[in-house]
Image (cartoon, rainbow, N blue to C red):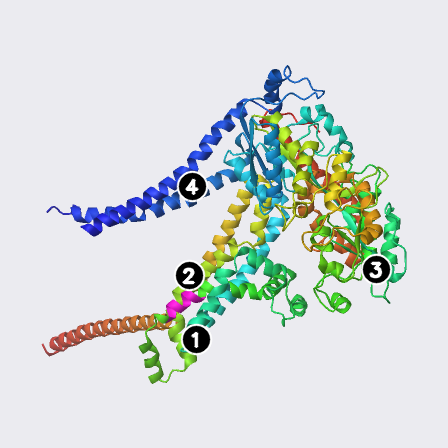
């Protein structure tokens, strides 16, 4: 009898456990759904704003045409894949300025970040502001991003940000609405190893180089006797070419804001193939050629000390080139920006963010997004955190999170360079030491030799154009279904490089497919936004 | 008691049944909530265009448009299905055969048997999705001594390219495939340990070699486990993170023109193909009778034939006897008439 009672109790406990587990999961979204229903009822972002505008306009007499912030106690959620410690610091500064607003940050890693965001949306827990990882399509086709046009256009601070954001209308996605905006900026760098140039006894190119000067430098750094190669790429010349050579082109594949001009892309592919086949490009990893060159089949070309230029990301400098391992091998890497186009554009990596289309506090969400991304006050909070070398003694925040300012505010940039690379021209603090090796961050000798490259780099990088997937609707679809599968399984670029085909032969077909993918993505976005009462025109 | 009336179980039995149901209730709830309901939902999604709006999910009924669109405008998925089909058909027998061989080796009386068994099962624990992905990315999935390029060139000469590419892909991922064998080895080991050793002893007394013992004792005994392992392998290969179709379906979910509806349609088509592969292997394995069943059937057939023949002969004999008796009767009648 006892056994039966025990078994019944155990079974009952199991069932109760299962049901309570299910119940807990169910009840929370239900509660959140009710709030999101409320959001839906209030209409789009601009409708919500109108309500707060009414209260606020009387209270705030600043020069800004923006409505005033609410004085009610509210909570905002911010979802990101940034450095958690830094974001929390910046959020604290925001809450200190607006004590009635509580900011809850949600940090996720980049693995399946967009998927996590969609899951939160599906369960009714859409954050008020959030970052988007790369591909913009999922956010547009599900109308996740709220319309922040009225705030963006009314905010005078937005006139003093990286010029390309406004001139290339980044975050409009080819529509009439500002749906997102860059909130992290990593200028792209073409790193030059000055040591190679010294060894070859040739001059390093000027920092304001043209495209042709860059190509000539790649060729000059290639020397079979010395065993040096001109360049190696992480970010591709094919990506750079249309942005750096086209007139008013604002994206990969010759994107002009509404359609592709693939002739520029074709010129880039042909030139890239010519350079690779002409052995100006370092051997690819895990090949016999690489083994013959380095003695190690898998060695990275930029680690050999026999490479002229590495086309790479901004974070590579602090993560690798600025470490004792690389310096002790005699390498002297300095950054160049990509050559600027006639319109002044260079290539850069930009991460976008936006406010939710269902947020009940669009004005405040916009302010929080600005604070986290491009606002001067937010950047001041970031720089304060960078200077806190005591709390983060083992791994300073500036080494963990390395974006450059999006604001053009001169004081912010000056302060930023203090943390990152205090050259003689910008040096403000006397003792800036590298906490990793305890040495002075920039010695006097280094400053004399490399300082001008960094000063010029920071001066030239401020007009960035990002990758296609984060600013061109349908771009990812185009790459996946057309670009990498035209002709046969090799992909277009390899067909040109390995089979000697001319990229111009693909222009008409790819241009058509690229434009079609863009139109289809915009249609999907328009349909989604129509469902929440926002008319999207393109 | 009236005829046909069902006997009601006693109260004790009823109570025991209730407890049984209570014990399986968590599983039933789990299967309904976590398997059946999502499946129904997924099928419903596949007939709709889905928008995951922050204001709530919006569904636009499109009928079978998602399915037809896959065939009309999505060459990636169809080509992916084709490759998956061929690779699975080739890789599953390789994995199952390898598992059986290793299981038989691990079933021998060797020293440190436990350690060897652990070594072969370890990849299941440590080689989770991300680890396998890293291995594959670092090209550690193929056997270094194996010249895959040469195999590909050779196969390309004699086979259609699609088939040659699929076979080559099996060779390129040989280590990965062999690492998938841990669970199958365990299942085979369990089956091998259940075989009565007296069967082998009897076979040896009758002069049976090890080769004969394998084909006539081991294989017929573990045959149900072969089917189980094949089903497990097909499902494992179809649902792991290295499968390009799973990645494609996942990416489609986030794409502008795809979304949950279109991705669900893809997933349903994929599951139909996956089920077809399982059925194909089941028919292939269960449809084949082993040598004893074939012989017994033949013997039964011959026995029946003999019986039929005996019956035929007996009937013919009886008929002839009757004819003869009639004939004799007539002769006797004629003789008696003559004498009269």
Residue beneath the point at 78% across and 52% down: A443
Whether callout 2 and callout 3 share a subunit is answered: no
Q: Give the CA separation, mark 4 to mark 3.
A: 64 Å
Residue where numbered disc 2 is placed: B228
Q: Is residue A116 visible?
A: yes
Where B261 sits versus A301, above or below? above
Q: Give the CA separation, mark 2 to mark 4.
A: 26 Å
Q: Are marks 2 and 4 in contact (CB under 8 Å)?
A: no
Q: Chain of mark 3?
A: A
Residue where numbered disc 1 is placed: B112
Q: Give the CA separation, mark 1 to mark 2.
A: 28 Å
Task: Please name which of the two marks, 1 or 2, marks the residue nearer to the observer.
Answer: 1
Whether callout 2 and callout 4 share a subunit is answered: yes
Q: Chain of mark 1?
A: B
Element type at mark 2: helix
> What are the residue bounds of the magenta stretch?
B185-192
């Amino acid at each position: 009898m006892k056994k039966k009672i025990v078994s019944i109790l155990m079974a009952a406990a199991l069932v109760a456990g299962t049901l309570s587990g299910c119940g807990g999961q169910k009840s929370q979204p239900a509660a959140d759904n009710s709030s999101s229903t409320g959001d839906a009822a209030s209409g789009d972002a601009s409708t919500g704003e109108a309500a707060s505008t009414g209260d606020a306009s009387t209270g705030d007499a600043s020069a800004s045409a923006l409505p005033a912030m609410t004085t009610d106690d509210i909570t905002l959620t911010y979802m990101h894949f940034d450095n958690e410690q830094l974001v929390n610091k910046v959020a604290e500064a925001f809450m200190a300025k607006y004590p009635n607003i509580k900011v809850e940050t949600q940090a996720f890693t980049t693995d399946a970040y967009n998927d996590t965001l969609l899951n939160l949306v599906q369960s009714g827990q859409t954050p008020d502001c959030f970052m988007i990882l790369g591909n913009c399509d999922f956010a547009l086709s599900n109308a996740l991003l709220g319309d922040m046009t009225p705030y963006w256009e009314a905010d005078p601070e937005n006139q003093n940000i990286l010029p390309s954001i406004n001139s290339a209308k980044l975050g409009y996605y080819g529509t009439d609405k500002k749906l997102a905006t860059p909130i992290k900026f990593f200028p792209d760098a073409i790193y030059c190893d000055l040591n190679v140039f010294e060894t070859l006894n040739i001059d390093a190119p000027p920092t304001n180089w043209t495209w042709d000067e860059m190509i000539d430098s790649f060729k000059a750094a290639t020397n079979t006797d010395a065993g040096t190669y001109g360049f190696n790429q992480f970010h591709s010349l094919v990506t750079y070419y249309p942005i750096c050579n086209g007139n008013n082109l604002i994206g990969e594949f010759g994107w002009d804001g509404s359609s592709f001009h693939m002739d520029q892309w074709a010129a880039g592919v042909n030139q890239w193939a010519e350079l690779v086949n002409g052995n100006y490009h370092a051997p690819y990893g895990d090949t016999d050629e690489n083994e013959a060159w380095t003695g190690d089949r898998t060695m990275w070309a930029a680690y050999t000390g026999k490479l002229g230029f590495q086309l790479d990301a901004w974070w590579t400098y602090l993560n690798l080139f600025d470490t004792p391992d690389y310096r002790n091998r005699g390498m002297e890497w300095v950054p160049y920006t990509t050559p600027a186009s006639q319109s002044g554009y260079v290539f850069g990596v930009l991460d976008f963010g936006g406010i939710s289309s269902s947020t009940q506090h669009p004005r405040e969400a916009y302010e929080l997004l600005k604070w986290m991304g491009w606002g001067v006050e937010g950047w001041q909070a970031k720089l304060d955190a960078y200077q806190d070398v005591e709390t983060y003694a083992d791994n300073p925040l500036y080494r963990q999170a390395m974006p450059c300012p999006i604001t053009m505010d001169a004081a912010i940039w000056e302060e930023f360079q203090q943390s990152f690379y205090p050259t003689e021209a910008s040096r403000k603090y006397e003792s800036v030491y590298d906490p990793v090796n305890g040495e002075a961050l920039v010695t006097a000798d280094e400053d004399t030799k490399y300082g001008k490259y960094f000063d010029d780099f920071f001066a030239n990088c401020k007009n960035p154009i990002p990758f296609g997937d984060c600013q061109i609707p349908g771009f990812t679809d185009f790459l996946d279904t057309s670009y990498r599968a035209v002709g046969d399984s090799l992909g277009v670029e390899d067909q040109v490089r390995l089979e000697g085909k001319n990229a111009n032969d693909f222009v008409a077909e790819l241009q058509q497919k690229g434009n079609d993918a863009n139109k289809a993505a915009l249609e999907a976005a328009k349909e989604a936004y129509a469902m929440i009462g926002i008319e999207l025109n393109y | 008691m009236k005829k046909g009336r069902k006997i009601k179980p006693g109260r004790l039995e009823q109570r025991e049944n209730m407890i049984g149901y209570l014990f399986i209730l968590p599983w039933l709830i789990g299967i309904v909530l976590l398997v059946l309901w999502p499946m129904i939902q997924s099928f419903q999604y596949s007939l709709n265009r889905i928008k995951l709006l922050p204001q709530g999910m919006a569904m636009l009924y499109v009928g079978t448009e998602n399915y037809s669109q896959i065939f009309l405008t999505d060459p990636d998925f169809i080509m992916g299905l084709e490759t998956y089909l061929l690779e699975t058909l080739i890789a599953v027998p390789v994995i199952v055969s390898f598992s059986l061989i290793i299981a038989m080796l691990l079933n021998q009386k060797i020293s440190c048997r436990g350690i060897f068994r652990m070594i072969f099962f370890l990849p299941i624990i440590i080689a989770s999705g991300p680890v396998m992905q890293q291995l594959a990315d670092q090209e550690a999935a193929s056997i270094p001594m194996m010249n895959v390029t040469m195999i590909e060139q050779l196969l390309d000469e004699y086979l259609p390219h699609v088939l040659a590419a699929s076979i080559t892909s099996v060779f390129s991922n040989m280590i990965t495939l062999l690492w998938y064998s841990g669970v199958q080895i365990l299942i085979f080991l369990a089956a091998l340990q259940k075989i009565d050793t007296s069967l082998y002893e009897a076979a040896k007394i009758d002069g049976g070699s090890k080769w004969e013992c394998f084909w006539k004792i081991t294989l017929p005994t573990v045959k149900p486990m072969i089917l189980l392992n094949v089903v497990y392998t097909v499902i494992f290969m179809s649902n792991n993170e290295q499968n390009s179709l799973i990645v494609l379906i996942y990416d489609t979910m986030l794409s502008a023109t795809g979304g949950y509806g279109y991705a669900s349609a893809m997933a349903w088509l994929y599951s139909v193909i996956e089920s077809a592969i399982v059925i194909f292997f089941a028919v292939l394995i269960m449809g084949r009778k082993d040598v004893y069943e074939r012989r017994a059937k033949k013997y039964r057939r011959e026995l029946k034939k003999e019986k039929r023949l005996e019956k035929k002969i007996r009937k013919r004999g009886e008929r002839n006897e009757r004819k003869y008796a009639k004939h004799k009767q007539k002769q006797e009648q004629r003789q008696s008439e003559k004498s009269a």
